Image: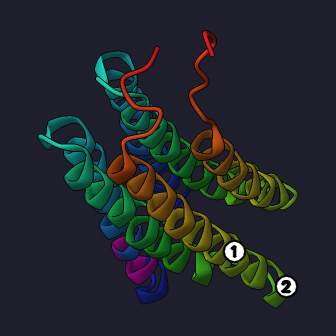
Amino acid sequence: MNAFLLAVALVLMAGIAAGLIRVAIGPTPSDRMMAAQLMGTSGIGVILLLAPVLAVPALIDVALIFSLLAAVAVTAFTRRRVTNHGD
Amino acid sequence: MDPVQLLSGAFLLVGAFFFIAGTVGLIRLPDRFSRLHALTKADNVGLGFIVLGLMPLTPDLFYGLKLVLVWLLVVIAGATGAHLIAKRALRGDGEDVL
């Protein structure tokens, strides 16, 4: 079962790597932020899968912190305003 | 291999499929709102199935409750984030400014 869990985690990590394409080419900042959010969620999935494999239950708490920080990052990004420095 | 592990493996595979679909959608779809649509599917359904698949492998109840809590937080954060990004895109403020 552990090998299977690791294989699923590897698929998720491949998804994170593919998401970097959108971060690189994304035409607007929103697209980059969406890619970052998907990568964050995939990272949470990888951590949840690694917790039983490594037998470290504390990794669930790491995933909890990650999910909280992802929400804060997106909210902070959307609160940013463009300021005109001339006037 | 007992049926519980088989069921758990099936749920994990479905979850991984939704994550792949979300990532491909994020890269391939043409505009911002359809990309947002693909992203939220991966967030909610993909992670939901991963958590559902890990549930039979949990040693005790508290561990399983924390798994569900992680999923609930991600769902709430995903819904809030998608709403904020869509509102920002509709208003057009802050876009295309580097």
Q: Label 1 sits on what residue type?
A: Leu
Residue that mark 1 sits on: B67
Residue drawn at 22 percent across, 35 percent down: B27
Element carrying mark 1: helix
* Magenta segment main secondary structure: helix
Q: Chain of mark 2?
A: B
Q: Are marks 1 and 2 on the same chain?
A: yes
Q: Which mark is residue B39?
A: none
- Tell me what residue is drawn at x 38 percent, y 75 percent: B11
Dot 1: chain letter? B
Tag 2 residue: B62
Start and end of the magenta stretch?
B6-10
Q: Amino acid at mark 2?
A: Phe
Image height check: is B7 above or below A4? Answer: below
Taking the image as shown, residue B56 lies to the left or right of residue A15, namely right
Name the residue located 46 percent from the left edge and 64 percent from the top edge.
B83
